[in-house]
Image: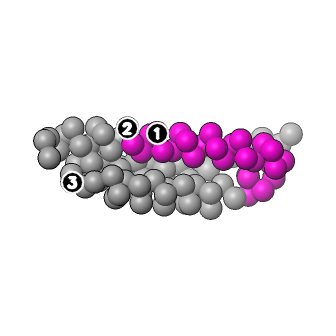
Amino acid sequence: MAARRPNIQAALIDVVFALAAAGVGLAGLGWMALAGLVSTHGLVWGWTRRAALASAPPARRASLAAISLGLIAAVDVAVYFVGSLAHGPH
């Protein structure tokens, strides 16, 4: 098995989306804005990992995608919540 190289660009994109989720919470925007951000993050994740996902067997690809997208949503929602706490009462 060949050693995998880290995808720094994809990691930076994930950090930018997390910061954007904090910004959505800090700005006091609602859940619909967060839902749009999480959906876009999921689409970008799929695009940036398309080569790795294509090389995985279909059953493993499905489980990798489900786990990863669930974690993306959890992190974005948590960071949104922290940002909304900094915003104060609505």
Q: Contact, CB < 8 Å: mark 2 with mark 3?
A: no
Circle 2 residues within 10 Å: few <14, some 14–19, many ≥20: some
Secondary structure at numbered mark 3: loop
Left or right: where 63 falls relative to 72: right
Secondary structure at numbered mark 2: helix
CA–CA distance in space, label 3 to label 1: 19 Å
Q: Residue at x 19, y 40 (%)?
A: 86
Left or right: where 29 falls relative to 11: left
The residue at which mark 3 appears reads as 27
Q: Amino acid at mark 1?
A: Ala
The residue at which mark 1 appears reads as 74
Q: Residue at x 39, y 42 (%)?
A: 77
Q: Contact, CB < 8 Å: mark 2 with mark 1?
A: yes
Q: Which mark is residue 78?
A: 2
Up/down of 15 relative to 82, above or below? below
Q: Contact, CB < 8 Å: mark 3 with mark 1?
A: no
The residue lying toward the viewer, choosing from 55 and 71, is: 71
The outermost residue toward the left is 89
Residues rendered magenta in the picture: 51-77
Circle 3 residues within 10 Å: few <14, some 14–19, many ≥20: some
CA–CA distance in space, label 2 to label 1: 6 Å
Q: Residue at x 27, y 48 (%)?
A: 25
User: Residue 11: horizontal and vertical position, in percent?
Assistant: 53, 48
User: Residue 55: horizontal and vertical position, in percent?
Assistant: 81, 52
Q: Residue at x 48, y 50 (%)?
A: 14
Q: Main secondary structure of the magenta part?
A: helix
Up/down of 37 relative to 85, above or below? below
Tell me the quadrant of the picture where the N terminus can be found: top right
The residue lying toward the viewer, choosing from 30 and 41, is: 30
CA–CA distance in space, label 2 to label 3: 15 Å
Left or right: where 78 falls relative to 26: right
Q: Amino acid at mark 3?
A: Ala
